[in-house]
Image: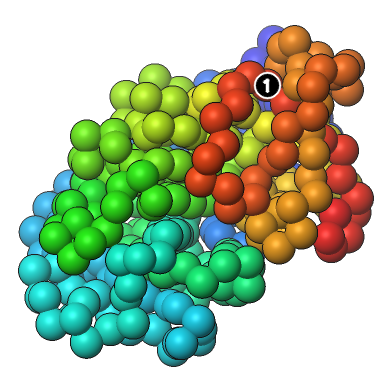
Amino acid sequence: MKSFLVIISIISVCSAGLVVPPARSAEDADRYFYFAADGSSELEVVDSLDPVDEEYIAQYVRNPANNQYWLFTRANPSDPQTLVLEDDDSVRLSNFDPRRATVVLAHGWNGHGGNEMNLLLTEAFLHDADVNVLVVDWSRLANRGYTTAKAGVAEVGRGLGRLLQWLTHHGLEYERTHLVGFSLGAHLVGNAARETGSLIGRITGLDPAGPLWGSDRNRLSSSDAAYVEVIHTSSVLGFTDPLGHADFYPNGGTSMPGCWVSSCSHSRAYMYMASSVKNRHLMAKECGSYRDASRDRCDGDLYPMGNSDMDKNGSGIFRVNTGRNYPY
């Protein structure tokens, strides 16, 4: 019976386009899973029972400087200026302008501030409007094992929240602040917004990480900000259930056109977001349920997925069918 269950597990994983880890037993099917680094087509086997390096997390979060905050504006679109918590001169001597809206970007597992996700979204937001773009680089922790990186997400998010609170003394307005996080970064920005008293104007969660987040109270929630939008693109690597006020399931939310592996579908979330910011063209139909969205049985009103609008206030489940190639 155990051999039969392992075979079924292998078949289901292969159908998702993944390389299968060495089979051990039926129990191992729940213990081991695949996850992808930000923007990578490579999938790594993760042991859910890997011990969390609590000592490393404690040392990491003890020093706020371990998280880097890189400011980009139209005056410096490719050369970042570093903002340092409690260092007022780092803000005064930078191009930060409180009269502009502020967009904050947070990467996921094994990511970094200069990865594809951050480059695409920074360019898109600066192309769309004259805004402050703040990239969070938490790579020193994010590049640890998955279980350790995940365990540190909430505290890294709270650290970002404290930075945003401090920036209000330099004119930052919560209602004109948009937090965008990919994969583990989606849960990170949820915790950042909570730290501000859930006063942030908008959160966009880009295929929030799914593994080990099912019952975690630190996961992204619709209560984290005035408006929370979630784009689900991989049911294997991402969190499938609705998490926001508006939850989008492009192409059904499982496998994206032009992708043959789940890591590609996972990354499509930030690619769709970047395209929607520049083109404002991905109009989704409201669905009666996730089941309807997955089966392309949606005939409700149209509502935009993504973009940079700070006044979005829709709610529900939505589906948009995209193309295989940019601008999708």
**Is residue 201 visible from the viewing direction of this image?**
yes
Residue drawn at the location 31% of the way across and 66% of the way down = 98
Residue drawn at the location 28% of the way across and 84% of the way down = 94
Measured from the top left, where is residue 107 in percent x and y? 46, 59
The mark total stands at 1
- Look at the numbered disc 1 and give the secondary structure of its residue: strand
Left or right placement of residue 103 versus residue 328 in this view: left
Residue drawn at the location 76% of the way across and 59% of the way down = 279
Q: Relative to 72, does residue 138 appear above or below in the rendering?
A: above
Q: Relative to 122, does residue 102 appear above or below in the rendering?
A: above
Left or right placement of residue 173 versus residue 134 in this view: left
Q: Relative to 305, does residue 62 appear above or below in the rendering?
A: below
Measured from the top left, where is residue 183 in percent x and y? 51, 47
**Is residue 3 visible from the viewing direction of this image?**
no
Q: Nearer the viewer, residue 124 or 159?
A: 124
Left or right placement of residue 79 versus residue 125 in this view: left
Q: Nearer the viewer, residue 173 or 61?
A: 173
Measured from the top left, where is residue 266 in percent x and y? 66, 48
Measured from the top left, where is residue 168 in percent x and y? 19, 56
Quadrant containing the N terminus is: top right
Residue that numbered label 1 is attached to: 317
Classify mark 1: residues with Cα within 10 Å, few (<14), some (14-19) or many (20+). Answer: many
Q: Nearer the viewer, residue 77 or 108?
A: 77
Looking at the image, the residue that sits furthest to the front is: 99
Quadrant containing the C terminus is: bottom right
Residue drawn at the location 58% of the way across and 48% of the way down = 309
- Amino acid, disc 1: Ile
